[in-house]
Amino acid sequence: MQAVMEHVQWLIALHIMAFTAWMAGLFYLPRLFVYHCQAEPGSAEYERFTVMERKLLKQIMNPAMIVTILVGGTLASLPGIIEWGALWWWMKLIAVIGLCGFHGMCSVWRKQFFIQKNNHTERYYRIANEIPTILMMIVVIMIIVRP
């Protein structure tokens, strides 16, 4: 535990970088879905969006989410980092769980586009695109301001 405590700033830096990459993907993927709705199924443009979405999810978002959760869990396990009785911690945790749920929904939506069974409109994805912003704001406020 002492070895981890000596490198806590590096862990925090890694956590922030992974969270930033994850959030970038959560902001961008629903925007790709908006444009994907405009493409004709079977067209080259439709297939290009399918490839872009798969690569974004599998090569950037999934690893970034995993690193964010693993490093965040490690930081939370360190003595003195978390005030377990404080409301801010639980609000942050709920928002992170919400981000994980949204990530899962993005995965479902990507698969629906892949099999050409998208059931949602551009407007739906435009509105969905606001969800990670709200959850990210909660996470940042809870960890920085700790109301």
Image (cartoon, grey):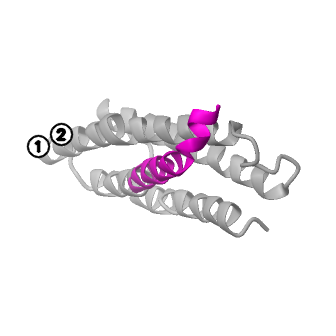
User: Which element carries disc 2, helix, strand or loop?
Assistant: helix
How far across and how far down the image is residue 11, in percent?
A: 51, 45
How far across and how far down the image is residue 38, in percent?
A: 26, 56
Task: Please give the residue where the numbered disc 2 appears in the rendered image.
Answer: 47
Task: Please give the residue where the numbered disc 1 appears in the rendered image.
Answer: 44
How far across and how far down the image is residue 142, in percent?
A: 70, 62
User: Which element carries disc 1, helix, strand or loop?
Assistant: helix
- As for residue 135 lying within the magenta part, the answer is no
Q: Quadrant of the N terminus?
A: top right
Res 74 label: none
Which stretch appears magenta? 1-24
Q: At 22% across and 51% down in the image, what residue appears? A: 39
Identify the image quadrant of residue 52: top left
Q: Residues within 10 Å of mark 1 (few under 14, many from 20)?
A: few
Identify the image quadrant of residue 140: bottom right
**Left-right relation of 43 to 31:** left
Q: Are marks 2 and 1 in contact (CB under 8 Å)?
A: yes
- As for residue 3 lying within the magenta part, the answer is yes
Instruction: Determine whether 31 is above or below 117 in the image.
Output: below
Q: Residues within 10 Å of mark 2 (few under 14, many from 20)?
A: some
How far across and how far down the image is residue 147, in percent?
A: 79, 68
Q: Is residue 92 visible?
A: yes
